[in-house]
Image (spheres, rainbow, N blue to C red):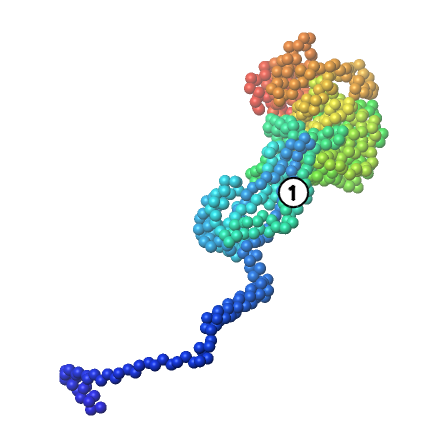
Amino acid sequence: MRWRKRKVAERKRGAVYVTRKAPEVPKAEKVEKPMPEWAKRIDWSRFRIIIGAGLFCLFWVVLWFRACYLQVVIAPELAAKAQIQHEFIMQVQGKRGTITDRNGQVMARSVEAHSIFASPAQIQDKAACANQLAPLLGLEPQKLYERLMTMQDKQFVWLKRKVNDITAREVRALNIAGVGERTEYVRVYPFKHMAGQLLGFVNTDGKGLEGLERSLDNRLASPSFKQVVRRDGRGQRIELCEGDYCPLSGEDIRLTLDMHVQYIAEEAVSRAVREFDARWGGALVVDVKSGDILAWAQYPFFNPNSYSDYGTLIYRNRLAQDALEPGSTFKPLIMALALNDRKIAPNSLINCEGGKWIDKNYTIRDTSSQGTITADKVLRYSSNIGMAKIGLKIDNKRYYQYLHNLGFGQRTQVPVSESRGILRSPKNWSRIDTISTSFGQSISVTGLQMAQAYLTLLNDGVYKPLRLVDQDIEPDKRDRSFGRETAREVRRMMRDVVETKDGTGRRARIEGIEVGGKTGTAQKADSRSRTYGSKRLASFVGFLPAANPEFLVLVMVDEPTRNQFGGVVSAPVFKEIGTRLLAYSGRTNMLAVAEPKEEKQDEKKEGEAPKAPSPASSVPLRPLKLAGLTPPWEGRTDEVVEREKSSKKPQMQLPGRLARASHRVPDVKGKSLRNAVELFARGGVVPELKGQGNHVVKQQPAAGSLWPEEKSAGSCVLWLSEK
């Protein structure tokens, strides 16, 4: 301790202290101990092998227990995780059935398309994925990124359905983990707008939304099935289906339509709608012998390939869904009932009151001034008064049952979405209801129902269902609506409507063949005023040939503005369809030139019944050369045909409305509106009508002046008034 204190004091004084080293002690040498005797007797090389083998067996046992634990104890949990990562189940809809016409022309079919999907849970960098995919799929990157983030726990999300092949190939080239493609089917309509409203369309998932695609969806659609899709580590699909799950196809449907006849009908209807500036137009062409619908035309056209570009008013199937008052086309059906029940006879006298009849508080008017005429002329002149008096002879219950048997107030057997129309119970009928129903008011029917009723008339009073799908239809056991002789008598009256000079359907006449038909100009109710307004439905129902009907044609033109009469607007459509239909069907051997039927009114006593000629013998027929019947689509216009006819000797004298019009304006003052319009129509002019009434009191241009060079709207005007 004293030495240490001195050492510290010296350091404080700055002295240098030098320590002394301790003397080194020599180390003792290590002496190896000798190996025990028992260790010398052990074979250490073998011992090491045994130890290594033991450790290996222990490691193997541990692995074996670990494998048992994974494959037995927690196997279900791991299998579920693996399934989530490497496979998923999709509800798959197979290929939709094909729709064809009667000749096998494909009207609707399904073709393969690519759809892009993603598994957000498998995508690591969702921002990069959105930036790469969005430009190819036409999406906004930010919205795509937000969608992936919102559904990041999902295993399946659609990104873009039914893209083109180029887009699918570009997406495939990106090779993004968690993004794949799937083959779906897109619906294609090769004929575009032809029969568009009838066919309808399907949505993105292949479900029918309108038309036949909807009404026949249970047959066209493929049975859905579950498909197991396997993916690799990058989320790419490596297996399409598993087990017994295989793609299925829906049933193929063959329609009774003929696409050539469909084209003829659509062309004629579209021309009439455009010419008369109408709201819409439609036509049905039916094969009488089989009941097959050959054409279902409607204008404006609708292309189901791009259905999202159209509104509901365009793709609405109006021929089946719009219930309208039929107007005068309803009269032949009521005439058949009255004749069948012997309420009248063809030569019964009907007083048409000179065109105006006041029944109690109601006034009924005709478009022509007729006095007392026979019943067989009521249809020819389309007399509302005559039909009203005939309808009052029929009991309301019988009236209702008859109309019900014809198919009114109920749906037809045609597999389309259709309206029932309006046919009220007879207990609610008043006297005015009976009167108005007789000439096509107070009842609402569809164009399809009218075609069904006329098919019964052409089938000699026996109900025959219309067919649109080429399959057997269960027979509908209904009572015969009227007798065979009654049906033939009504058809003869309808023949006179077209073939006589004073019939309302003269514009439907086809040179060389007798046809029958009935015009209709139905008033349309105004929902605001709750009365009949100024709008009309111009229609015509006809058949050909008149003696033995083979084709039925119904034409409807709704709300025409330049002229409203069915004989002016719709009858020429029937003529065009009928002429081209005969040429296409190869029935030109039936055609003959019909001589005009002349009737000398002054030689007949008033009230004398005209002799009812048979349809086959009433008009002398002469053979017509087929060269004059070349169809219009082969480049021959009507003007060329007329020039060829006029160049032949001896020249043929054209009867009635076919006579060449004078080059001067006719005098139509005091004439009925119908006659005045037809006289102007001969000169190629549709006059503008002003005022209210059925008779012309003033005209422009003046009578005897030359026709204006420009025959446009407003160049010729007729002022009307009540006589």
Q: Which of 59 and 3 is in front in this view?
A: 59
Identify the image quadrant of the N terminus.
Answer: bottom left
Q: How many numbered marks have been drawn onto this rendered protein structure?
A: 1
**Within 10 angstroms of label 1, few (less than 14), some, or many (20 or more) residues?**
some
Identify the image quadrant of the C terminus.
Answer: top right
Where, by quadrant of the figure, is residue 693 drawn? top right
Residue 36, position as x, y percentages in the image: 43, 80
Is there any visible trace of residue 125 in the rendered image? yes
Quick check: 542 left or right of 666?
A: right
Residue farthest right in this picture:
342
Is residue 524 placed above or below 608 in the rendered structure? below
Q: Which of 630 and 541 is in front in this view?
A: 630
Quick check: 349 left or right of 706?
A: right
Residue 678, position as x, y percentages in the image: 66, 21
Q: What residue type is labelled 1?
A: Ser
Residue 682, position as x, y percentages in the image: 64, 18
Quick check: 91 left or right of 429?
A: left
Residue 614, position as x, y percentages in the image: 81, 20
Residue assigned mark 1: 249
Where, by quadrant of the figure, is residue 467 drawn? top right
Q: Which residue is drawn at 73% across and 17% down?
A: 592
Q: Which of 136 and 233 is in front in this view?
A: 233
Q: Residue at x 59, y 62 (%)?
A: 76
Quick check: 427 left or right of 7?
A: right
Q: Which residue is drawn at 79% across and 26% down?
A: 490
Q: Residue at x 80, y 32 (%)?
A: 462
